[in-house]
């Protein structure tokens, strides 16, 4: 298992982007969380198998129907902690 940390830039707050990311991650059996940053970006931490995380990146780039994703910055890391589910943090 590895960890993906992503910062999503664009119109990604107030457009159900976090709920979209949580649903995609849950459907792919990933664990971690998604949260809004104060600068208008969204932070995503997801843990899972490399091939599944690569598929997840496609969802991050697509976004919810009201979102407009400009870019997704991704760091691949060793697992930093354990999570039991994929949650939305406030």
Image (tube, rainbow, N blue to C red):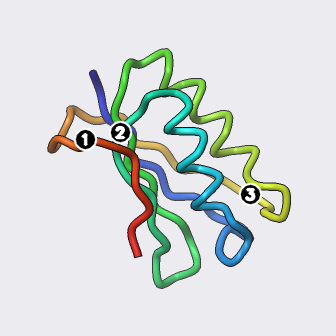
What is the C-alpha distance between the residues marked 2 and 3? Answer: 22 Å
Please state which of the two labelled residues, at mark 1 or mark 3, is closer to the viewer: 1
Where is mark 1, residue-wise? 84
Residue 28 lies left or right of residue 9; in this view the side is left
| Tags 1 and 2 touching, CB below 8 Å | yes
Mark 2 or 3, nearer chain start: 2
Where is mark 2, residue-wise? 31
User: Residue 29: percent from the left, percent from the top?
Assistant: 44, 28
- Mark 2, secondary structure of its residue: strand
Mark 1 or 3, nearer chain start: 3
Where is mark 3, residue-wise? 69
The residue shown at (44%, 62%) is 88
User: Residue 39: percent from the left, percent from the top?
Assistant: 52, 82
The residue shown at (74%, 58%) is 70
The residue shown at (74%, 71%) is 15
Neighbour tally class for label 1: few under 14, some 14-19, many 20 plus, Cα within 10 Å: few
Seen in the picture, residue 42 relative to 80 is either above or below; the reply is below
Q: Farthest residue in the bottom direction?
A: 38
Residue 48 lies left or right of residue 36; in this view the side is left
The one nearer the camera, 50 or 84, is 84
What is the C-alpha distance between the residues marked 1 and 2? Answer: 6 Å
């Amino acid at each position: 298992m590895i960890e993906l940390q992503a910062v999503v830039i664009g119109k990604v707050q107030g457009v159900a982007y976090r709920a979209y990311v949580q649903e995609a991650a849950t459907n792919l059996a990933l664990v971690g969380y998604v949260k809004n940053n104060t600068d208008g970006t969204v932070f995503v931490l997801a843990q899972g198998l490399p091939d599944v995380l690569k598929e997840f990146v496609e969802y991050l780039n697509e976004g919810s129907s009201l979102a407009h994703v400009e870019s997704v910055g991704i760091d691949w890391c060793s697992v930093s902690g354990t999570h039991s589910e994929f949650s939305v943090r406030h």
